Amino acid sequence: MKIPHYFWEEVSCGIAFSLLLISVTVRLLLPQIAIVYENIGDGYNNNNKNTPELAAAISSNERALLLNPDYVEPHYNLGELYEKLQDKKKALDEYQIAVEDDFERAYNKLGRMYIIDEKYYKASSLLLRGIELNNESENDTDNTVNPVISKLLKKLGLNSIKQNTSTDDEKVKYNLRKNLGWARLKQERYAEAKRYLKDAIKLDNKKAPAYCLLAQVLQAEKNEAGKTNTEITNNWIYCLAYASSYNIDEDQWIKEARQYLETHLNLGKNQVIPDELHLETVEIGTVKTAEGVGESILLRGKSDPIAVSKDEPLYSGDLLRIDKGADVVINCDYNNNKKNHKWHIPEGIWVGVNNGCRQPKSIE
């Protein structure tokens, strides 16, 4: 189509304006596209239906950063992913970038890594700042997934961790206080450690870590002041009842709890958990079969020990011991995730029933 010469200038201006408009539109859309990639990365990392795809999650978060270099959340996500892959240096680098932008969840993760590295003062400083930020942002709930992005994730068969925002906020609040209590324990500042760990327990009394750490704090104080064993014992029992071997920190504390209880409580067939201890009574499953050469014994709160049999209901906080080795098949209904779990427990070792029903958890 021929354009008259006298329209060339107008057409050129129109084309230039159109290109400018397209460029500006794309530029404005880049941050939104980055959010899409970041959410897709979350979906790959937290895929409930299949094994998490960590390489794909890393790629999606890196693309998000290419589209929007100022977007801080992909740095935090990459820190988590590299930590899962045990690439400590890369994880520290990514968490550090997120901390520099005051991303509060990164303070918790970086603080925990410093505790593992025995850099307790660095950890305490970060965790205190994290708690301060967490308190400031309590009323900020604008962290939900955009409905369009949510539909896209569902089509891809993925899910995003941002769909349970209030639960995630409570987890961050708990973990900041738990980790600060841990750091103060290592600094031998026991009064502060107790305060933060008890605050964590008030936030969630069904999680093991704060109980496990509080038991250690009380033991350290007892060694200094000759205190009684009762409160220490109770916290170790809670620790053992709620701990999961899938969590690297809790697995170590399970060992310490067993050692302490074997020495100081010597739980046996005719002994029960102290009367003042009241574990939760949330049913999480039933015994499908209980077979073997030995006897399977269950302890629940302050009740008498019970021999495990088919169809026995199991509750959050129960402790199980098998005398001479037996297979117990449990039909778990933990967080609406029904699965049969077959346990083989070495002779005489106490385990928390929660431990057999939980799925592997991330490091917190």
Image (cartoon, rainbow, N blue to C red):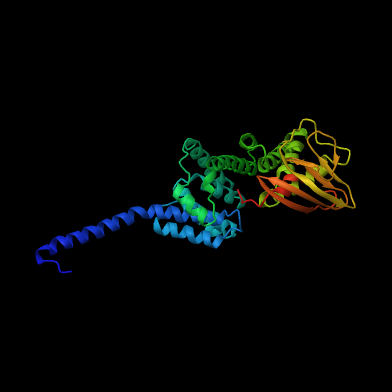
Q: Residue 352, located in which quarter of the rendered image?
A: top right
Frontmost residue, 305 versus 182:
305
Looking at this view, name the residue that lies furthest to the bottom: 2
x, y (%) of residue 48?
60, 53
Q: Quick check: 230 left or right of 115?
A: right
Looking at this view, name the residue that lies furthest to the left: 6
Placement of 173 over or under 293, stated as above or below: above
Q: How many marks?
A: 0
Q: Quick check: 100 left or right of 321?
A: left
Looking at this view, name the residue that lies furthest to the top: 276
x, y (%) of residue 280?
72, 36
Q: Quick check: 147 left or right of 333?
A: left
Placement of 294 over or under 63, stated as above or below: above
Looking at this view, name the residue that lies furthest to the right: 293
Q: Quick check: 267 left or right of 157?
A: right
Quadrant location, the N terminus: bottom left
Frontmost residue, 338 versus 243:
338
x, y (%) of residue 333?
70, 45
Point 21% across, 61% down: residue? 15
Query: Does the rendering let one see residue 350?
Result: no
Placement of 267 over or under 73, stated as above or below: above
x, y (%) of residue 10?
14, 60
Placement of 322 over or under 272, stated as above or below: below
